[in-house]
Image (cartoon, rainbow, N blue to C red):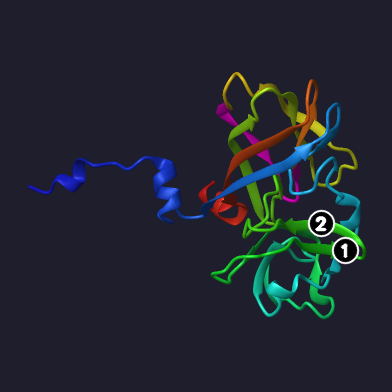
Amino acid sequence: MNFSQFHSEPFYLKVSKGKVNGHSYIHKFGAVPAMSQSTTGTIWDVNDTLYPWSSFNVASNLTIPAVNASDDGKTIIIQGLDANYNFKSQQVVLSSSGAVQTTAFIRVFRAYITDAAGNVGNIDINVSTTTVARITAGKGQTLMSVYTIPAGFTGYLVSTNATCEAGADASVDTFTRYSGENAFRVAHSFELTGNGGPYNTEFTIPLKLTEKTDIDMRATTRSNNARITSTFDILLSDNSYIHMEK
């Protein structure tokens, strides 16, 4: 008897295995090292700072300033979107003697080092002089809870999670800015305390995010400074496949 006919894998496991046509997933995770008390900032590698979206008003070359001598010659991969909001990945060799540049990006949402030894110092990725991504020393990749839905895709926010170190608390907001709009607005909001355990929500009906929508997880600390982490999972659906199904 062929028992496989009675076995049905969960939908999201099939997506992870690449067995669902026109669908993929994004798992974003970020951490802010030590946000100051009574401060609002994006949950990413730079303390006390809202993510500088205005740096990407136009597609721009990225600059990686001279790195720690121990990181000279190592390679990083930068991931984001090109001028047409299509997914883009570029490999860059680091230098301790001077800055290196990439070709143009309109968004950056992940970077990681490929060298087995990791990164000894911070690796900043800038537009002009503004940092738009950072691989913190010893972490090996960015920890940034920001993302932009690529052109030709629709995203569905499936779940979100956050933690806060013991003794601290914060309000956390999931901000979104839809394509064609100028302002970010709150799509989901919750309270977080380090003494109460992690916050986790799986949306019964996932939040629909159209192409080119920006997502920015922001925290506002209250009683203490804090290290705060957050994650969110997005199901990506290829719009051409969706239209083909109709």
Please report whichever mark, 1 or 2, sits nearer to the chain's N-terminal start: 1
Image spot of residue 245 (x, y percent)? 51, 49
Residue 92 against residue 218 in the figure, above or below: below
Residue at the spot 64% in from the left edge and 24% down from the top edge? 194
| Residue 87 in sight | no
Residue at the spot 12% in from the left edge and 49% down from the top edge? 2
Residue 198 against residue 28 in the figure, above or below: above
Image spot of residue 119 (x, y percent)? 65, 65
Residue at the spot 68% in from the left edge and 22% down from the top edge? 167
Check whether the beta carbons of the residues at disc 1 and disc 2 lie within 8 A of each other: yes
Give yes or no for residue 212 being in the magenta stretch.
yes
Where does label 1 land, which residue? 127
Q: Dot 1: what SS?
A: strand
Q: Of the residues shown, which amino acid type is indicated by label 2?
A: Val
Q: Quadrant of residue 228?
A: top right
**Magenta highlight: main SS:** strand
Which residues are the magenta region? 200-215
Where does label 2 land, which residue? 132
* The residue positioned farthest toward the left in the image shown: 1
Residue closer to the observer: 95 or 206 = 95
| Residue 24 in sight | yes
Give yes or no for residue 55 being in the magenta stretch.
no
Residue closer to the observer: 244 or 23 = 23
Q: Of the residues shown, which amino acid type is indicated by label 1?
A: Val
